[in-house]
Image (cartoon, rainbow, N blue to C red):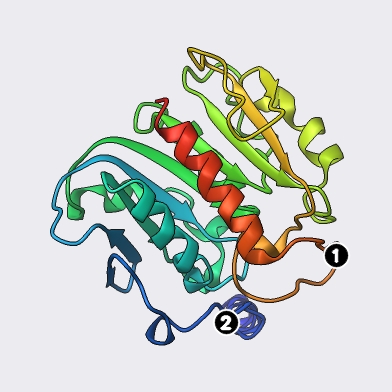
Amino acid sequence: MRYLFVCLLAFAVAVSCTHLGDPISDQDFVNDIYETPDYIRITEPGRDSFEKGLFFYPGALVDPFAYVSWLDSLVTVNPMLMVVVVKMPANLAVFNPGKAFALQDELPPANRWLLSGHSLGGAMACKAVDDNRDKAVAIILLAAYADDKDNLANWPHPVLSVSAEFDDLATAADLQAAEYLLPPPYRMASTADFPMPPGIQTFYYEIPGGNHAQFGNYGEQEGDGQATISAGEQQAVVIDIISQFINRL
C-alpha cells in the first residue's frame, strides 16, 4: 500500500510539473490534426496513405502540444509524411518507450517508419529502436542521445542528431560522450551538408544561437542556456534539416 501511495504521489508531482504547450484550440493549422487519448496525428488534408510515418516522443514533462505547431509546418513541406506525436503517461516517455510500435496497427499505412524525440523523448526513441531493430529506417534526435543500455552502433540505418549552441541541458560534451552508442559520426557544416549517398552514419548538426527549450513551444526551462535566436528561427532550421534528411532516405 505504501508503494502504491508513493507511485501515485510521483505521478501527481510529474503532472503538476509538466511544461505546457500552446493550446491546440488557439492555433491555426494548415493540415489535419486528429487527436486521440494516445496520440496527435498530423497529415495533409484528404491523404490516407503515406510514404513515411514519423513518430515523435516529447521531452520529459513537456506537453505534446508544445511541438504540434512546427510539426504541422514539417508536414506542409513534406505532404507524403504522416507525423504522430505520442502521448506518454505523466508526459514521461520512460514509462512506455515502445508505445510507438504498439500504435502502428491503428494508424494509416506508411511505407517506412522513423522515430524521433526531443531530450528524454529522443533517448527513449533510441531504446524503442534497440528493442525493435527491424521496425524503423531512421532516428531523428533533437537535443538527445542514446542511453548506455541502448547500443545502436551497429544498427544498419542512419541517425540525424540536431543540437543547439546554447543548450545547457544536452550539451556538446554529453552528445560526444555518447557517440559510441550510435553509427559513425559525420559532422555537418550546414543543414544541406549530407554526403551523397548519405550512408549509414550519425549526422550531427548544431544550430547556432539555439537552446534546449526552443525545440518546442513551452517557454523557458530551468538550467537551460540563453538563446540568441527566436524559437521560430530555431524551429525553421529543424524543419529544414529534417526535410533534407528524410528526402534522402
| Residue 115 found in image quarter | top left
Q: Residue, x 47% and y 84% (percent of image)? A: 23
At which x and y percent is residue 79?
Answer: 28, 48
The vertical placement of 230 against 17, above or below, is above
Q: Residue, x 32% and y 74% (percent of image)? A: 37
The vertical placement of 25 against 147, above or below, is below
Q: Residues within 10 Å of mark 1 (few under 14, many from 20)?
A: some
Ranked by sequence position, the earlier of labels 2 and 1 is: 2
Residue marked by disc 2: 8
Q: Residue, x 80% and y 31% (percent of image)? A: 176
Front one among 10 and 116: 116
- In-image side of 52 versus 9 (left or right): left
User: For the residue marked with disc 1, what is the amino acid?
Assistant: Gln
At which x and y percent is residue 215?
Answer: 63, 59
Q: CA distance from mark 2 to mark 1?
A: 35 Å
* Labels 2 and 1 touching (C-beta < 8 A): no
- Count of marks placed on residues: 2
- Rendered image: mark on residue 84: none
What secondary structure is marked by label 1? Answer: loop
Is residue 8 at least partly visible in the picture?
yes
Q: Residues within 10 Å of mark 2 (few under 14, many from 20)?
A: few
Is residue 128 at least partly visible in the picture?
no
At which x and y percent is residue 91?
Answer: 54, 69
Q: Residue, x 17% and y 51% (percent of image)? A: 108
Residue marked by disc 1: 226
The vertical placement of 101 against 130, above or below, is below
- In-image side of 166 versus 40 (left or right): right
- In-image side of 71 versus 194 (left or right): left
At which x and y percent is residue 47?
Answer: 15, 53
User: For the residue marked with disc 2, what is the amino acid?
Assistant: Leu
What secondary structure is marked by label 2? Answer: helix
